[in-house]
Amino acid sequence: MPVLLTTTQEDGKSVPNTAEGTVRTNTLPTSEVKPILTLQEIQSLTDPSQIGDLLRQLNQHEQHVDHELDLLLDRTEALDDQMNSLLRLQPKLNKLNTGTQYLASTVSHTCELAESVSGKVRELDLAQTNVLVTLSKVRDIMDLKECVEGVLAAMGQNDYAVAAVHVHRYLSFDPALVAVELKTLGMTEGKPASEKIQECVDELHQRINRGLDDAVRDNDMNSINRYFKLFPLIGLEMEGMRKYSLHVCTQVALRAQQRLKAAILEGEATGDDQKIQLVNTLQLLFQDIAGEVENQTPVVETHYGPGRVLPLIQALMRECDRQSSAIIDTFLTKRLVHKLVADINQARYSTHRDILVVASSTSNTTPGPDPRDIEGVLWELSAIGGHSGVFERFMRTRAEAEHHCLSSPTKEELDISKSETTEGGSSRSRSTTPPAANAEMIVSTGGKLSKASPLKRSPSIQMHPDEETRREHIKREKEQRAAFLAGVSLELLSGKETGLNRRVQEIMGQYILIEECFLMSCVHKAVKLDTHDLGQMTSTMIDDVFFVVQKCCNRALQTHMIGCICAVLNNANSVLENDFTAVLQRNLTTGVGDTMSQFFSTGDFKNVLEKVQRKMDTSAVNQISQYLVHLNNVETSGQYLLKLQGGLKTQFAQFASSHSEKDKQKGLACLDDMLIIQKCYNRVLSEAWKKMFSKTVFPVLISACEAMQSVDYVISLQDLNFYEVNDPFVQGLIRDLDEVINAFKPHLTSTNFVTLMNLLIQNLAVQLEAAVLSKSFNQNGGIQFDKDLRTLIQYLANMTDGTVREKFARLTQIATILCFEKVADLMDYWGSGAGLVTWRITPSEVRKALQLRTDFSRAAINKLRL
């Protein structure tokens, strides 16, 4: 029989294990398994050492097995104790089984009892609900009977207020229930109760309507108020508001007609239609209507409820259309506006619009009507537009507030809607079987498993009759508001033009035409009557033109109408950009002729200054004086235009917030066009300065710089000391420049003087640089030129606030190069040695400047690495 032999290796030793004919290991970790030896192989062992090892392994395994057996025998007592404990628990487990069966039986019985009780509760709840409904119907029948009796009694005593209260109570009942409940009242005064109560309601309607009509005819305010507050009680809200609105509108119309008649009579008494205060009459109409809205709102809201003022607002707006149209027609007739417009149109087609043609004509009159005759009409038209705009915005705001009050749900409606949403959600939650009820309820009864049915849930309890009545009442109020709102015209809210708005738009079109005529006529006259007063920088034309433009724009802003404002601003921009620019350019084309340049070429600038100041009547002096005034005119026009644009923009922002963003952007775009015109003026001024400078100052600069050619800059130290006392060049140049500057400075605006100095400095720097590059220098000559340049820069810096050193930067760097002791000194200022110095001349120009030094060799200059 073969014997399986396995060995385990632990700590380098093999341990033999044998069990049931098999040698194996169970407890010691196996790290190495040796080949299995059969019985024949064991018998074939002849080596004593191998036989000894095998015997030793078998002995160790035997010892290990004995140890395990000892451990198992030691646990026998503990196992016996555990078995005894289980035997002692058996009686308790039997009792627990019996109790569990009893509990399952009790739960099943309780479930059946609960189902029986819940059914009885539902029956009691239904009975209670029926009792409450019956009591509610009994109360309704008693209230209805009281209403019928109260109406009959009040009508017999002509007490319409009490009758209206009873009718209001009667109308608050559900019509379906009323039809049924009236049958239970039987006969009243020989007629069915339903027929009798309806006769009383109809008769009450007639009496209240007739009473209000009589009170309105007699203008009895106490009776009007007494009957007016009864209409909502009898269900005639809209009829009451219609009659009351008619009464209020009649009073407004009567007062408006009286004011218009008084204004006309006052004008006829003075014999001057221009003194009729029609604009004031229109403004009083607007104030009267706005006052009625403010005064009647509390009265209407007290008796009719919030939002019911809307019909009154609509009626007053229609009455305003009629009365304002009558006032505007009277205004157009008395002010002869239609004739004025016809004259303007005729003048536009029969005369040339070009301002240059008008300004050069010999006639003392301007085309079209006299501006003095139409300015008053313009202010009145502007005021009409402004007042009507403010009034319409007020009425539209009030109408929107009333409409919002009618169309928005009340707090009670929101509460009911919220509660219905909550009840709907909870009802859905109750009707949904919970997860525990959906699961199978396994109950152990008598050792058997059975599935118990889920508990049936009772439906939700019905709403209390009083709560139902309240909700029904709120629902009827909502329907009444909707019906009331449906019967109101919404002209103010629908965006349609009102009659007042249409009339104002018509006269604003006429206003724009008249304003354009006024602007053109005034500008024509200002240009034609242009004069220059002694001691003034500009001529009278500039102040006059911009005063008129500002007046026209301010008048347009007073209308608060974006379309009108944009039209007037565009007309003003067109006049300033096209017509007035042509005038400025025309004036600048003269005065730059040979006479002017010849006068300056004499160098007698002091004489020029004196003659200009005394305004001697010589053509040359007058030419120079006029040209400087024209330059100032252009520069001042640009400044005035910026100031005008800023002021108009500030005024526009004050009321633009009440308009849409689109309209606001339109107005701002028209105002921004003025900045484009200002840039156009700057271009005209720049071109004029270039022409004037080339004819007058530039020849002086060339002559002064040519004097440098006669100065020798290859000098000795003795010559350098001599030049320090007897300057050969720069003092003469400064003297010539000083005479030129002083000749212009008193007659130029500050901005124009800065322009002159900039041109002078720029051209002087260019001419001096050209002159320097044509000269030869030694170090002493370079030092002398550097002194001259510093003296010149200091003089010019004292004469102007501009940056002089920046414009002379190239010359200053050339002068620095000319002062070097040797060529290599350049590297102390160039490249890494430059520091914060920014060189304005190129390397080739540096070499050219070094070559001006007669004592520098070409070879040393060429060796420089720049």
Image (cartoon, rainbow, N blue to C red):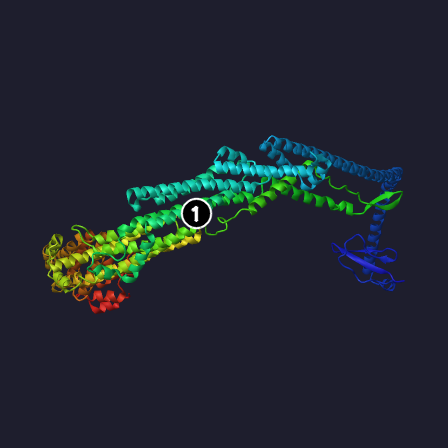
User: Horizontal and vertical percent for residue 754?
Assistant: 23, 54
Amino acid type of the residue tagged 1 in the rendering: Arg
**Element at label 1:** helix
Which residue is painted at 57% across and 44% down in the image? 484
- Decide which of 546, 719 is in the foreground and name it: 546
User: Horizontal and vertical percent for residue 862?
Assistant: 24, 69
Quadrant where the N terminus sits is: bottom right
User: Horizontal and vertical percent for residue 328?
Assistant: 38, 48
- Decide which of 746, 775 is in the foreground and name it: 746
How would you rate the neighbour count of disc 1 (Cα within 10 Å): few for under 14, some for 14-19, many for 20 or more? Answer: some
- Decide which of 7, 724 is in the foreground and name it: 724
Tag count: 1
Quadrant where the C terminus sits is: bottom left
Toward which corner of the image does residue 708 lie, by quadrant? Answer: bottom left
Toward which corner of the image does residue 464 lie, by quadrant? Answer: top right
- Relative to 743, 332 lies left or right: right
Location of mark 1 (residue): 322
- Decide which of 106, 206 is in the foreground and name it: 206
- Relative to 537, 672 lies left or right: right
Q: Single out the residue that lies furthest toward the front.
A: 190
Asked if residue 85 shows in the view, the reply is no
Q: Is residue 484 above or below residue 857?
A: above
